[in-house]
Image (cartoon, rainbow, N blue to C red):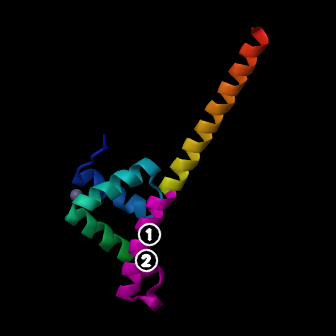
Amino acid sequence: MKDIINCSKAEKLIPKYIKGETTDAETIRLLDHIDSCDSCREELTIQYFISEGLDNVEELNDYNLLKGFDSKIKTSRTDIKIRKNARDGFIACIVGIVVVLCMGALTVVL
Ligand SMILES: [Zn+2]
């Protein structure tokens, strides 16, 4: 089941997300929320623009900011997927090793 958060929780996560301080779970919750909540999406966009705008005042350009914002969200999702797949792959590998070891032990016993 999806972990749904409300707007006030999403609003608290927005500044953390922009600073890159959210955990994977928090990022997923926030991104899922803004997918279905226009006002939080707008809030995230505004806060992102402000933070990016202040970081690169000389190249302040709406088009670039919008592109940067979209790519930040895409990157967050991709990174989480990659980390999750790596984790699942690692667990599958450990399970495989344990199974092989158990079978080996059984063969020795029998
Ligand atoms: Zn919301």
Name the residue rendered at 54%, 51% in the picture: 83
Dividing the picture into quadrants, the one containing residue 95 is: top right
Give the labeled residue for mark 1: 72
Name the quadrant of the N terminus. top left
| Figure check: 56 above or below 7 | below
Horizontal and vertical percent position of residue 38? 21, 65
Dot label at residue 61: none
As drawn, is 87 to the left or to the right of 105? left
In terms of secondary structure, where does tag 2 sit? helix
Give the labeled residue for mark 2: 68
Name the quadrant of the C terminus. top right
- Name the one closer to the observer, 47 or 1: 1
In terms of secondary structure, where does tag 1 sit? helix
Q: Which residues are magenta?
A: 51-79
Horizontal and vertical percent position of residue 69? 39, 74
Look at label 1 and name its amino acid: Lys
| Figure check: 16 above or below 56 | above
Q: Would you say the magenta stretch is mainly helix, strand or loop?
A: helix
- Name the one closer to the observer, 62 or 94: 94
In space, the residues marked 1 and 2 are separated at their CA atoms by: 6 Å
Q: Is disc 1 in contact with disc 2, using a CB cutoff of under 8 Å? A: yes
